Amino acid sequence: MSHLDYLDLPPARRAAGTVALPGSKSISNRVLLLAALAEGRTEIAGLLDSDDTRVMLQALRQLGVSVEQGADGVVRVDGVARFPVAEADIFLGNAGTAFRPLTAALALLGGQYRLSGVPRMHERPIGDLVDALRGLGAAIDYEGNPGYPPLAIGAFAGGGAERVSVQGNVSSQFLTALLLAAPLVVRGTGRPLVIEVAGDLISKPYIDITLNLMARYGVAVTRDGWQRFTVEAGSAYRSPGRVQVEGDASSASYFLALGAIGGGPLRVTGVGADSIQGDVAFAQTLAAMGATITHGPDWIEASGVRVAEGQTLKAFDADFNLIPDAAMTAAALALYADGPCLLRNIGSWRVKETDRIHAMQTELTKLGATVASGEDWLRVTPPAAGTWRDAHIGTWDDHRMAMCFSLAAFGPAAVRILDPGCVAKTFPDYFDVYASLVTG
Ligand SMILES: O=C(O)C1=C[C@@H](OP(=O)(O)O)[C@@H](O)[C@H](O)C1
Ligand SMILES: C=C(OP(=O)(O)O)C(=O)O
């Protein structure tokens, strides 16, 4: 559907069925980089195939890493000690999970690299990461505005630093990037590297994903709460052989939400109680809103009310700092709540695919909701009966805006999603899967 300018959603009443989730974006891009930097070959099953992973795959190929996709869908990556290509101009779209970790790895290996992205990527901050990398001896220049991509990376001077500090309050991806690249420094100095976090760390569960995957590649990180992380001397990545990528827990949020408003049961497979992704906690938000959640090791199922028949979900007032991506789904669900809903501690929304606080407020307002916002919060008062309005929903080049507004089809207004193809960032066939679960 990516060729469409818009998609008119048919009026929806019920949602039920089972979805095999696409692979996790966060795990896919981390594993690709780890596999490239590890000794040995990794066979990756369940890798996400979307814009964000394609730019990472393309970057690794440009850097001289052998990446092959078999007929079985398994991707085979042969690790390298250093990237064979020392000079490259790399385009990374709008993929934060590719841009930040690759910046760290390339800067600490050194070479002549240029990293750029789409215009929005050039508005997404990276200064805190660049400052930390410079502290370790990296040569990085800003080609445009200081603090933002595009970046020019030069030779790594080293200097033997054993300690580095990074700000944690703008994006957790800066800490993730330093952690993933830390073994490259450690092997140069032969001494441990201590990474200290300055400011309050946001989006903490993503650090758990990073540490979990580093451990699978043989690197244990010693930690002191969320303040200090030590990568030990002698740390080096070694392929575990085969990695199975979990389903994407953020993508799961749309379907679980559909089960909660369209009766259900709606089951997602590929994530469950054993997941390493923080966004599985979104199921608890749904339960607090009145949905019934059951789960097994690798599945979650949601059943709930039928909002098309006038039933409502319970309103919420919650801190969403731990699940910023799934939180957008909660904001869309507020349309069907029995009172005003408050999303707190979501300041990172301002620097993601778009200013998500502004975009969410604008589009929910079009449907008839009353929305207030501040620097890091959003309050959504659902439209009163009879005050819903037909709307053309702008998606702001943000896959999650498109996906979460598909929930609006259960209301009484006609909903048109503009530029539905923007879902390609993480879920190219989202609207086909949606259509297979939802009935009028
Ligand atoms: O590390 C990751 O995989 C991610 C971290 C989060 O970003 P922030 O740390 O910038 O909140 C999240 O929003 C993003 O989609 C993926
Ligand atoms: C914030 C997101 O992406 P990125 O990995 O580009 O930061 C997201 O997918 O919601």
Image (spheres, rainbow, N blue to C red):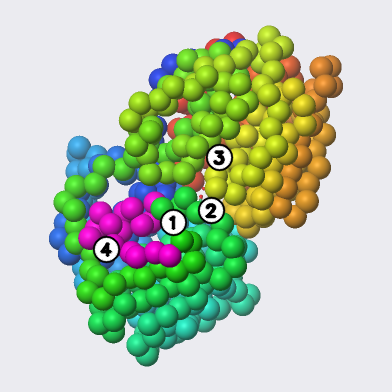
Residue drawn at 43 percent across, 72 percent down: 195
Query: Alpha-carbon neighbours of circle 3 within 10 Å: few (<14), some, or many (≥20)?
Result: many
Q: Quadrant of residue 429?
A: top left
Query: Alpha-carbon neighbours of circle 2 within 10 Å: few (<14), some, or many (≥20)?
Result: many
For numbered disc 4, what is the local secondary structure? loop
CA gap between label 1 and label 3 equals: 17 Å
Inspect the image, locate mark 4, and give the three-letter code of the amino acid beneath it: Val
Q: Tell which circle, 4 or 2, labels the residue nearer the N-terminal end.
A: 2
Inspect the image, locate mark 2, and give the three-letter code of the amino acid beneath it: Ser
Q: Quadrant of the C terminus?
A: top right
Mark 4 and mark 1 in contact? Answer it, CB < 8 Å: no
Q: Quadrant of residue 153?
A: bottom left
Label 1 C-beta lies within 8 Å of the nearest ligand 1 atom: yes
CA gap between label 4 and label 2 equals: 22 Å
- Using the image, determine if residue 80 lies above or below residue 141: above
- Using the image, determine if residue 46 lies above or below residue 43: above
Mark 1 and mark 3 in contact? Answer it, CB < 8 Å: no
Inspect the image, locate mark 3, and give the three-letter code of the amino acid beneath it: Ala
Q: Quadrant of residue 124?
A: bottom right
Numbered circle sitting on residue 219: 4
Is residue 215 one of those drawn in magenta? yes
Numbered circle sitting on residue 326: 3
CA gap between label 3 and label 2 equals: 12 Å
Q: Is residue 129 left or right of residue 359?
A: left
Q: Nearer the viewer, mark 3 or mark 2?
A: 2
The residue wearing badge 2 is: 203
Closer to the camera in the image, 139 or 390: 139
Magenta highlight range: 209-224
